[in-house]
Image (cartoon, rainbow, N blue to C red):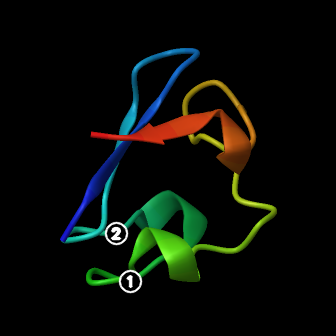
Amino acid sequence: MAQHRCTICGYVYDSETGEERRDLAAGTEWEDVPDDFTCPLCGAVKTMFRAQ
């Protein structure tokens, strides 16, 4: 499982836990996160995230 950090605000998407606020179940890998995903804290687009 991987983590991806928002380069704008520092929010971390963790594929192990998913993101309830964006209807992403635990275990959803970054590659399976929709392209229109936005950071739940600052609204940054998916391309603004970097693997940790």
Q: Residue at (53%, 21%) from the top-left corner?
A: 7
Looking at the image, is 43 positioned above or below residue 1?
A: above
Q: Mark 1 highlights which residue?
A: 25
Question: Mark 1 Cα within 10 Å, few/some/many (few <14, many 20+)?
Answer: some
**Amino acid type of the residue that numbered disc 1 sits on in the rendered structure:** Ala
From the top left corner, tell me how far across and down residue 20 is, in percent.
Answer: 42, 67
| Quadrant occupied by the C terminus | top left
From the top left corner, tell me how far across and down residue 5 is, in percent.
Answer: 40, 34
Q: Earlier in the sequence, mark 1 or mark 2?
A: 2
Q: Give the spatial CA distance, label 1 vs label 2.
A: 5 Å
Q: Give residue 18's mark.
A: 2
**In the rendered image, which quarter is residue 36 located in?**
bottom right
Q: Is residue 25 left or right of residue 40?
A: left
Residue reaching furthest front? 51
Residue reaching furthest right? 36
Question: Mark 2 Cα within 10 Å, few/some/many (few <14, many 20+)?
Answer: some
Q: Is residue 36 left or right of residue 9?
A: right
Looking at the image, is 11 positioned above or below residue 46?
A: above
Q: Residue at (65%, 33%) from the top-left corner?
A: 48
Q: How many marks?
A: 2
> Do labels 1 and 2 touch, CB within 8 Å?
yes
Residue reaching furthest top? 8
Q: Give residue 16's mark.
A: none
Looking at the image, is 33 positioned above or below residue 36?
A: below
Q: Residue at (70%, 43%) from the top-left corner?
A: 47
Q: Secondary structure at mark 1?
A: loop
Q: Secondary structure at mark 2?
A: loop
From the top left corner, tell me how far across and down residue 12 is, in percent.
Answer: 34, 39
**Amino acid type of the residue that numbered disc 2 sits on in the rendered structure:** Gly
Q: Residue at (22%, 68%) from the top-left corner?
A: 17
